Image (cartoon, helix red, strand yellow):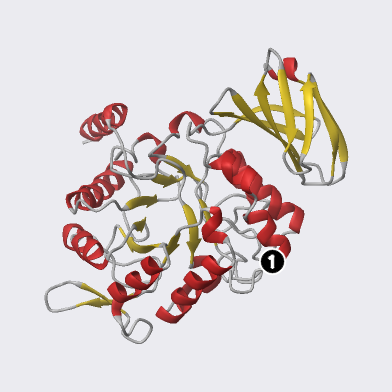
Amino acid sequence: MVLKKLAITTCILLLTLFVKAQTDVALTPPMGWNSWNLFEEEVSDKLIREIADAIVSSGMAHAGYQYIVLDDYWVGGRNANNELFPDPVRFPQGIKTLADYVHSKGLKLGIYSDAASLTCGGVTGSYNFEEQDAKTFAKWGIDYLKYDYCNAPDDMVTAFTRYKKMGDALKKTERPIVYSICEWGQRQPWLWAKAAGGHLWRTTWDIRDTWVSDKYDNGHNGIMNTVDKQKGLEKFAGPGGWNDPDLLVTGLFGKGKSSSLKGRYSGCSLTEYRSQFILWCMLASPLMVNLDVRTMDTAVATILRNKELIAIDQDPLGKQAALIGDYNGCQVFKKELSGDRYALCILNRRDTAGAFSFALNDLKIFGQWSARQVLTNQQLGAVKILSGKLAAHDCAVFVLVAK
């Protein structure tokens, strides 16, 4: 039995080497909004319509946020033909009508299910109904599926098998549905998720609304804990397949039962939220916000709509940043960009303000470069050394262009 499982695992890894993602889906990291951390079981037709309106009116749609993802608790059950139907109180007009409304706004609708009989919230999942549910999602006009792994077996082989079954079912519908594999990184999905049909795959436990947690597990995972778990994963990311370090808690300020761990975590500072957004852009991560965009304040909106940072995330080369230096509490991340350019992010992990100074040669960036400081809109011209001061937990971002 052990040898058989080892052989299957080897086949999964070999298949990953040869698989190609759908060429027309998720060529850049998906951007949008997800209902989970803030609203959880309060999802409804009314809420999603209002969020869609706000995504457009706030300028978020113009900035690139297009997927509105309806997370757990939307399901009412299965009918006599075993077809999924939505909760009739929360979604009295059905999902197809809701999808039509979202599409009328120029946006796309995502939905949620689980690779087991029950979801994390305890409602009906898709296990053993993958093909039927994929057809239902396509019929409704769904554009994105977040597929969770609660109540499913622990081993990698079973995870791959279950995820591939849904991936194959989605492809069979011939509708371009983004497939988000959400098994929390415990079975190394970066090795096999693309072979299962995935366009993005979670690399960590659920993120919490805190800068850092004193431990890392399924209940405690701050922004910095999540960033540390991305080290070495950059080689697995690229157009059509992305490492997913989970949702942006930017702008939540302690709201939301799940992200605050029922009040244990009180949220982050605006500086820390900006740093999360910057780091997610550097990591070529999906940019899925959780905050209530209907009441989003100006400072948070300015962060989330920053065109230059979003351009770094959405760069068509599709490279994920690598950690290339860690000096006296400052970390340096380098992301290769299209057009002979690099983005460099310098993160002050210290709890106090401090200065930084890095010679490009010491960062193994050789040649002649001009630089732009993104957050201050400064054109620095030809540079050999990058220097400055940073507040605690703050970032500086430079775009280097070959001269």
- The residue drawn where x is 31% and y is 30% is 13
Q: Foreground residue, 393 or 251?
A: 251
Q: Position of residue 91 (x, y in %)?
A: 35, 81
Q: Is mark 1 on a helix, strand or loop?
A: loop
As drawn, 290 above or below 217: below
- The residue drawn where x is 56% and y is 39% is 283
Q: Foreground residue, 173 or 164?
A: 173
Q: Name the residue under label 1.
A: 253
Which quadrant would the N terminus be assigned to in this image? Answer: top left
Q: Where is residue 345 in the image (x, y as percent from the top left)?
A: 69, 35
| 393 relative to 186 in the view: left or right | right
As drawn, 334 above or below 384: below
Which quadrant would the C terminus be assigned to in this image? Answer: top right
Under mark 1, the amino acid is Phe
| 129 relative to 25 in the view: left or right | left
Q: Foreground residue, 216 or 99?
A: 99
Q: Where is residue 147 in the image (x, y as percent from the top left)?
A: 35, 56
- What is the crowding at mark 1: few (fewer than 14 residues within 10 Å), some, or many (at least 20)? some
| 118 relative to 172 in the view: left or right | right
- Is residue 211 shown to the viewer in this render? no
As drawn, 382 above or below 258: above
- Is residue 397 shown to the viewer in this render? yes
